[in-house]
Amino acid sequence: MSRPNILLLFTDQQRFDTIQEIGSAFQAQTPHMDTLAREGIVFENCFCTAPLCSPSRATLISGLMPNDANMPGNLHNPCPPLPPLPSGLAPLMQAGGYETVYHGKWHLGGEICDHGFEIGIECNHDESTRQLASKFWRGRDWFEHDRPFFHMVSFLNPHDIYYFDPQKPSDRQRPWKNLSRPSESYPKTAQTQQVDWPESKWGAMTEFYEQLLERLDGEIGELLHEFICSGFAKESWIVFTSDHGDMCGEHQLPFKGSHMYEGQVHVPLIIIPPMTRFQTTPEPSPIAHNFPPGRRTQLCSLLDLPPTILDIAGLEKPASWQGESLLPLLRDPKAPAPHQTVFSCLSQPEIRMVRSQDWKYVCYENGEEELFHLKVDPHEIRNLAGNAACAVIQSELNSQLQRHET
């Protein structure tokens, strides 16, 4: 096989700071995600296009911002199913000679196979998703195939955080228990979603989130074992990410919501080149590479994943796509960032975010604004919107947001 397989592995509602090898704020042990981080290239500043399931997933499927993909909100709340696009990622991969496969949570409505997937099975049970993926690999491992595969495997967790037991006492403390600002300093939409729970209840939520992370990590470990033992690790790229994060008590906010704080917009992204040490024949691998593990601090977005996947496959991205391939950054850690700013949006209520390497500006439907200097205030405690000393940077970011939407 002269072209690599590509496995896109993604989770639901997983914050960036949940993997021990990257630097976790939690106590959950994540040995298998740690392995991915050690094997691959970690993008430390990746952001979702919407901190909501369906819009973010629509970006991965379509290569477009949620509004451009006609999925600005969640499925049926209020959006109809995602319309199939001939310029979507899977149709382009299939046209380029790839077998296209999808297993796991979908949350975009309609039929998966109408979106360019030859095999598409929706499943919201992580163990079953892992088994379906493993069965596909085991069905191929003893046979010659003239086409590589592009395989999306979508896990549900740690989305089950919604089912934590608030009555179960816990002495666990939130990582950000002592990081706070007055409730009246938050935008009204965030204020309405803040809750004044006792620390034991926040602790129960934190502990349950950690349990879900460890269960997820176990499934990923089993998945990687099957992938390696099916013989594909040596000839496949693996991409690992999540659709969005979770607040988990930060800013007195549970779950996800109508705001743009780092806990829900900052997501993990790891790209792992083929593990050529698993080569079982003396001949050199036709897809040998020189991509040593490492970190990248340049700004990027989930909008960049579809172009990256096409680039790895040797295919051209459509002119309508706004993302950029991360392959140059994989080759050279000193390559320039694909963007100087990234964007995220919500539709009900309308909230828009633009983020640079050091600053974040958020504009709310009712006219409220937030501005954070993340380089010195990473936990977003001090809102600088309206501060005369920051007027220039606020105006610049606002202008970039306006240009992005025209």
Image (cartoon, rainbow, N blue to C red):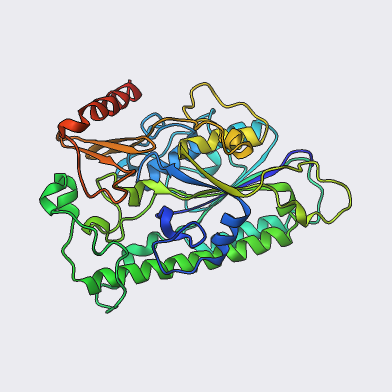
Residue 218's quadrant in the figure?
A: bottom right
Q: Residue at x 44, y 68 (%)?
A: 28
Residue 120 visible? The answer is no
Residue 114 position within the rendered picture, expressed as x and y whole percent measured from the top left: 53, 38
**Relative to the observer, which residue lies in front, 137 or 41?**
41
Q: Is residue 125 left or right of residue 344?
A: right
Q: Nearer the viewer, residue 15 or 295?
A: 295
Q: How many marks?
A: 0
Among the 4 quarters of the image, the one containing residue 286:
top right
Q: Is residue 146 left or right of residue 369?
A: right
| Image location (x, y in percent) of residue 254 | 26, 59
Between residue 1 and residue 353, name the one nearer to us.
353
The structure residue drawn at horizontal position 34% and vertical position 52%, both measured from the top left corner, is 263
Can residue 59 be seen by looking at this rendering?
Answer: yes
Quadrant (top left/top right/bottom left/bottom right) for the C terminus: top left
Residue at image coords 55%, 66%: 31
Q: Position of residue 242 (x, y in %)?
A: 46, 50
